[in-house]
Amino acid sequence: MKTRKLGQNGPEISALGIGAMSFAEFYGPTTEMNSFAILSAALDAGVTHIDTSNVYGMGRSEKAIGRFLRDNPGTRDQFHIATKAAISKDAAGNRCFDNSLTHLEAELDKSLQKLGVDCVDLFYVHRRQADIPIEEVAGHMALLKQKGKTRGIGFSEIAPYSLRRAAAETHVDAVQSEYSLSTRAPELGLIQTCAELGTALVAFSPVGRSFLTDDPIPADRIPSLDFLKANPRFIEPNYSANIAATDPFRAYAAELGLPAASLAIAWVLAQGNHVIAIPGTRSTAHFAELVTGGSIDLTPEQLTRITEILPVGWAWGDRYNDAQWKGPERFS
């Protein structure tokens, strides 16, 4: 397994991590035993980074990780654990974002309890609260680091200009953003700004929410998945168009003797030595495909062929609908 530094000041971690949203049934039913099997497989494969959040299954993901660490003494030091906070609800029960120090610290304290650890290795602001200057929020995060509750700090789904403003206040170890062959927006300045500032780019959904695998989520299962059934890329006619567009990618992976997911991961990691991929899965067999992708070095010719098959802008439908776009920062 390749390793990479988490930003210029961070520790060396595996280039491939675990996106633990899958531990909370985001993409379908799972069990705690399934999650434990993924974590055990990660230890065996040298995958050291785990990414979770306080809102994944309303704490279910963090609790599963915490129980695994408790049941397997000594494993805490083998993992680099990241979690997030800031997504909340207002008095009317509507989704909102809270970047106040009081909220972030209280949620981090709850996460530490659920995980059963004294501190996390990386703590993100999950979504920006637009009416608080990001410099102020960066100061909150720096204070939590000074208190010893997290070793590193980051932001999720922010634009390059926001990263620059935050970094003027304190070093930002990581920015998390959706990035894959189907979502190339980070190339419009975010990858470059992260590299310039010594910040890791942590790519979630690096296999395109299954479109870049050999087994895309079938159409008849989408109605049971709350996020995907409302997502433009999974609504017809876009869904069928995206399956057709990625068929040649699956064929090319097979030509190379690779699972499509392995090739998709290898492509993401080839985009910069500061890029880390955090795919999620409920299957140890699929996890093995992802791990394979974390050890492949693609040739310039292979990278060129991949982008010929899936050029920038190939995906049908926006990556989010109007409601899902609430929070992430757009940039161009």
Image: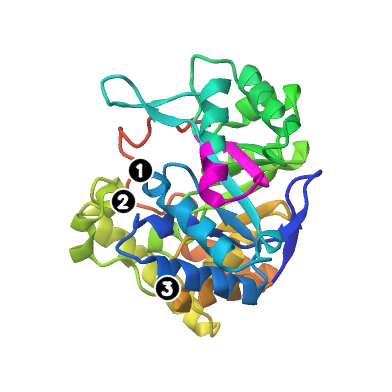
* Side of 128 relative to 174 (left or right): left
Q: Amino acid at mark 1?
A: Asp
Q: Circle 3 sits on which residue?
A: 283
Asked if residue 141 lies in the magenta stretch, the reply is no
* Side of 196 relative to 181 (left or right): right
State the SS at label 1: loop
Q: How many marks?
A: 3
Q: Residues within 10 Å of mark 1 (few under 14, many from 20)?
A: some
Lower position in the chain sequence, tag 1 or tag 3: 3
What span is colored magenta in the figure? 110-126
State the SS at label 3: loop
Looking at the image, which residue is at 42% across and 59% down? 23
The reply to whether dot 2 and dot 1 touch (C-beta < 8 Å) is yes
In the rendered image, residue 270, in percent from the top left (x then y), is placed at: 66, 61
The reply to whether dot 3 and dot 2 touch (C-beta < 8 Å) is no
| Coloring basis for residues | rainbow
Name the mark on residue 201: none
* Side of 275 relative to 252 (left or right): right
In the rendered image, residue 306, in percent from the top left (x then y), is placed at: 54, 66
Q: Amino acid at mark 3?
A: Ser
Height in image: 200 above or below 145? below
Q: Circle 2 sits on which residue?
A: 233
Looking at the image, which residue is at 27% across and 54% down? 234
The residue nearer to you, when weighing 153 against 164, is 153
Gap between marks 2 and 1, in whole Å? 6 Å
Lower position in the chain sequence, tag 3 or tag 2: 2
Q: Circle 1 sits on which residue?
A: 318
